Image: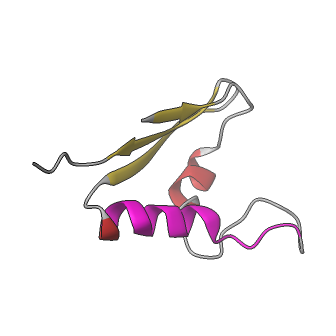
Amino acid sequence: MKIADNGQGMSESVKQKVFDHLFTTKGVGKGTGLGLAIAQSIVIEKHGGTLNVNSTPGKGTEFVITLPILA
């Protein structure tokens, strides 16, 4: 599954930290920095998948979620 936007994108430094616990780009009191860390934990640890981010400044950001198919 891919989720994308056409926003301002992320710098390389933000992209490297976006899944870190407590990292947020929002102002003080506006975000906890837990959302993407928890999402990555669920996708990887609970489902054996991957969660990756592709972003180009000025072009937008895309999150790619891959889950294994179990038969």
* Residue that protrudes farthest toward the front in the picture: 71
Which residue sits at x=56%, y=50%? 15
Quarter assignment of residue 26: bottom right
Question: Which region shows up in magenta?
Answer: 30-44
Answer whether residue 35 is magenta in the image.
Answer: yes
Answer whether residue 33 is magenta in the image.
Answer: yes
Quarter assignment of residue 61: top right
* Residue that protrudes farthest toward the left in the picture: 71
Question: On the picture, is 51 further left or further right than 29?
Answer: left
**Residue 21 against residue 52 in the figure, above or below:** below
Which residue sits at x=67%, y=35%? 9
Q: Position of residue 55 (x, y in %)?
A: 56, 36
Which residue sits at x=66%, y=32%? 57
Quarter assignment of residue 48: bottom left
What secondary structure prevails in the magenta region?
A: helix
Which residue sits at x=89%, y=73%? 28
